[in-house]
Image (cartoon, helix red, strand yellow):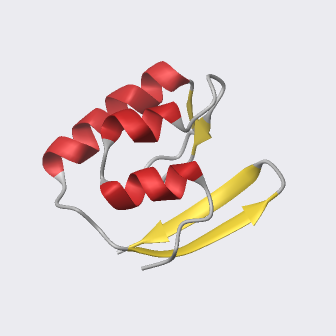
Amino acid sequence: MISGRTRYSQALAAFDQASILGSLSDEVTIRVAVHDEPLRGKDTASFLFGVLTQELTPFELTEEIVEGDKSVVLFE
């Protein structure tokens, strides 16, 4: 697992919904491979991560790419 350079990746690694949401801005945009349109806003992120933390088993972060105020987190 990566060491977690951002609060977001550390929260994902802990699989902690409250910490994940606390690390995001109110204007967050999330892009996922299985959805064509970007998901926008903290309320949408709250719903998404609520479902994910209930339905998925914890996963392993494999890479984090940070460029300015944007980041990509890859996981298995």
Residue ID at (68%, 69%): 65
Determine whether 24 is above or below 52 in the image: above
Query: Is residue 33 among what the camera can see?
Result: no
Indicate the position of residue 9 as horizontal and vertical percent values: 51, 58
Query: Is residue 46 among what the camera can see?
Result: yes
Residue ID at (31%, 45%): 16
> Which of the two residues, 68 or 34, is positioned nearer the viewer here?
68
Asked which quadrant contains residue 54, the reply is: top left
**For residue 11, side relative to residue 64 (left or right):** left
Residue ID at (43%, 41%): 20
Indicate the position of residue 36 as horizontal and vertical percent values: 53, 46
Indicate the position of residue 50 as horizontal and vertical percent values: 27, 34
> Which of the two residues, 3 or 27, is positioned nearer the viewer here?
3
**Quarter of the picture holding the C terminus:** bottom left
Give the number of callouts: 0
Determine whether 28 is above or below 73 in the image: above
**For residue 20, side relative to residue 47 (left or right):** right
Residue ID at (62%, 22%): 26
**Quarter of the picture holding the N terminus:** bottom left
**For residue 19, side relative to residue 25 (left or right):** left
Residue lying at the far right of the rendered structure: 68
Indicate the position of residue 28 as horizontal and vertical percent values: 62, 33
> Which of the two residues, 17 or 40, is positioned nearer the viewer here?
17
**For residue 45, side relative to residue 71 (left or right):** left
Asked which quadrant contains residue 19, the reply is: top left
